Amino acid sequence: MGFLENLINGVSLGSVYAIIALGYTMVYGIARMLNFAHGDVIMVGGYVSFVIASSMGLNPLFGILVAVIVCTALGITIEKVAYKPLRQSASLTVLITAIGVSYLLQNTALLIWGANPKVYTSVVAGWPQLQLFDGQLIISAETVVTICACAVIMIAMVTFIHRTKIGKAMRAVSEDPGAARLMGINVDSTISITFAIGSGLAAIAGVLLCSSYPTLMPTTGAMPGIKAFTAAVFGGIGSIPGAVLGGILLGIIEIFAKAYIGTQFSDAIVFAVLIIVLLIKPSGLLGKYVPEKV
Amino acid sequence: MAMLSVEDLNVYYGSIHALKGISFDVNEGEIVTLIGANGAGKSTTLNTIAGLLRPRTGDIAYEGESLVHVPAHKVVEKAIALCPEGRRIFLNMTVRENLEMGAFSRGGDAADETMEKVFQRFPRLKERINQSGGTLSGGEQQMLAMGRALMSQPRLLMLDEPSMGLAPILVDEIFDIIKSLHETGTTILLVEQNARMALKVADRAYVLETGNVTMSGSADALAEDDRVRQAYLGG
Ligand SMILES: Nc1ncnc2c1ncn2[C@@H]1O[C@H](COP(=O)(O)OP(=O)(O)OP(=O)(O)O)[C@@H](O)[C@H]1O
Ligand SMILES: [Mg+2]
């Protein structure tokens, strides 16, 4: 039973990583940049929903909605103000800017909400647990909701980029922005939409993360952000199924490492696995490479 | 008045002066070709007209309206399409999706009709409609690139080296298509390394050398010119 329980917890944690990794991978795929502030958008989502649900006592679902709206607007603003002026700059410049934005968000949160951790009330508090095998295996409502949310989001994203006009335009921009412009696609607004989607997803990830791990601090998003970035690279950066696969595997590895090897080592093991995978397959698990024909 | 009129165009890549004040015209219904050696500035010219590059000085007038400040994604709305050098089709997207992207600036239903027309011209694309662009042969990729450009229903079609890297039989096929597009009323601005074929289909031609127009005239006259024959037609 212990094994199964760990596995389910791993998939649940991995689902959160996967949702965050989707934002990383889509932004990278389209704007070719690593948005290191992405993790901190999660934290903002956590605080916004906390304020709505816990401080103001409103419906938690309304809290999620507001968090998604605020983070979407935040993502669009960050892109417009910090990244768009650097579209022609060296990638190192953009990377350093992203780190700067990350600290800006953390310190703003520190200023508004203080350094003391908030105790986050789960959005599904009071929902029944799932009891299996005569009560030997108990799965929390948070776990079930997180895994379901990840599945729904992944299906929605894959459908979106394959079936809708904007989604296809995003794929075109990710392959060849110049050719996309020749088609009449506005690359700037496509990048903006990508940031909006990624940041909206980050808000949901923030709510789910804080519901399962209820300590909310200005740095709450940093480590999950880095792990989700790792997951995106692990699965093949730019690939949506890759981000989900990478996220879930990373979650499972982390939980198993914690359970069977030790809490101190779990993060080291997570990153060691990444290094090994990248040595064997530099494009990541599902990263694809299509050779160009002449 | 010419349909497209390029006036004293100067384009730079950083400090590299790629176009040094070139001027030329394209009249409605013509095939005009730009010929020149590698690095002469042919692609730079087409990319600037398409809005991918900004000229430092000079003007591009299309039907009396300046294109200099029109962004690339708006140029295509003016019924100008560029089929770029190296094809640049979307390798991870299917043939159908590539064609849909070509019609991005137009409505959905109109696109279906246009796609049928493209398939009439390139039946092989229809057979491969659900294949991804990356799995097509070089010739099929070129047809897809041209078909994609046609999806925007351009009145001015710019082709950058459409015959590059193709077997002779495919080169003939591509030039037949260019002729038939011209017959159905499309104005064509053609850039080619294959000067012999280009001068054969074109009405008029301009010779580009290191960013300058050095010769111009009717395609037939240039094909007879000694200097052109020496430099571009192999004597
Ligand atoms: N992205 C770029 N950065 C810097 N210089 C460039 C760039 N693209 C082209 N150039 C330079 O501009 C000049 C014109 O190049 P262009 O590609 O327009 O030539 P072309 O006539 O199309 O040549 P080809 O027949 O080889 O395609 C060349 O000297 C080239 O080296
Ligand atoms: Mg060229």
Image (cartoon, rainbow, N blue to C red):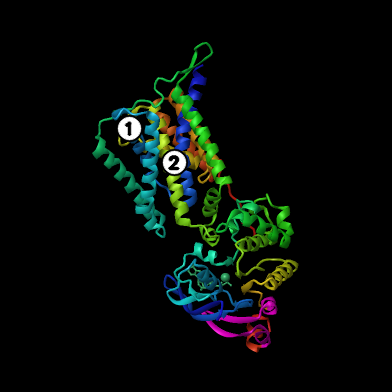
Residue situated in front as seen by the camera: B214 or A291:
B214
Q: Residue at x 46, y 29 (%)?
A: A146
Q: Tell which subunit mark 2 falls on.
A: A
- Which corner quadrant holds the N terminus of chain B? bottom right
User: Which mark is first along the chain, 2 or 1?
Assistant: 1
Above or below residue B61? Residue A105 is: above
> Where residue A120 sits: x, y (%)?
33, 27
Q: Say which mark, if any, is on residue A52.
A: 1
Q: The residue under label 1 is which amino acid type?
A: Ile
Q: Quadrant of residue A51?
A: top left
Residue to which mark 2 is pinned: A229
> Where residue A182 sits: x, y (%)?
54, 62
> Where residue A140 sits: x, y (%)?
45, 21
Q: Nearer the viewer, mark 1 or mark 2?
A: 1
Magenta span: B196-224
Left or right, B84 with reference to B127: left
Residue situated in front as seen by the camera: A57 or A236:
A57
